[in-house]
Image: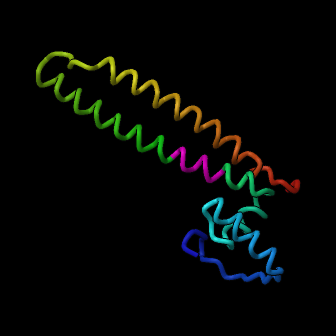
Amino acid sequence: MRRAPGGRTRVIYVRVTEEEDREIRRRAVKHRRSAQRFLIETVLSGSAQLSAERSRAQRDAEMARIGLARLANNVNQLAKWANTNHAMPAGLDDLIDDLARAVETVEQTAVSLGTAFSVGRRGSDGE
């Protein structure tokens, strides 16, 4: 309820067979979701696959953000060292390579996010 403004106040009851329940829960676990969250995301996104892609893209974006934050910290430390010593630090080439890889990861993640979320913006049922 914390994720929805005003909380979630509506309830939808769905009856399923034991086999359907097992399958829903199996798929939810596979996608690292509760059965309820899995059903909501699947219905709203139009497919379980799209829901999984969204989750994967969100995790990738968070990992890219963490990586960039670490590199930014390193750049700040090197800049401070360079200003203090009036010289460029050794190993700068390695840092530049790391930055290039991080930028590539962010670009790939941005493409994944764009692909994963574009259907949600248009609506899979023509809305």
Q: Quadrant of residue 7?
A: bottom right
The x and y percentages for residue 78 are 23, 27
As drawn, the residue found furthest toward the left would be 85
Image x and y of residue 43, in percent: 78, 64
Q: Residue at x 18, y 22 (%)?
A: 82
Residue 122 is a magenta residue: no
Q: Is residue 51 above or below residue 6?
A: above
The N terminus sits in image quarter? bottom right
Q: Is residue 61 left or right of residue 11?
A: left
**Residue at 41% over, 44% down:** 66
Q: With respect to residue 118, does 71 lie above or below? A: above
Residue at coordinates 60% horizontally, 76% vertically from top-left? 6
Q: Nearer the viewer, residue 4 or 32?
A: 32
Q: Is residue 58 magenta?
A: yes
Residue 10 location, quadrant? bottom right
Residue located 57% across and 68% down the image: 3
Q: Is residue 56 left or right of residue 18?
A: left
Start and end of the magenta stretch? Answer: 54-61
Q: Where's the C terminus, which quadrant?
A: bottom right
Q: Nearer the viewer, residue 97 or 2?
A: 97
Determine whether, in the image, residue 16 is placed left or right of residue 72: right
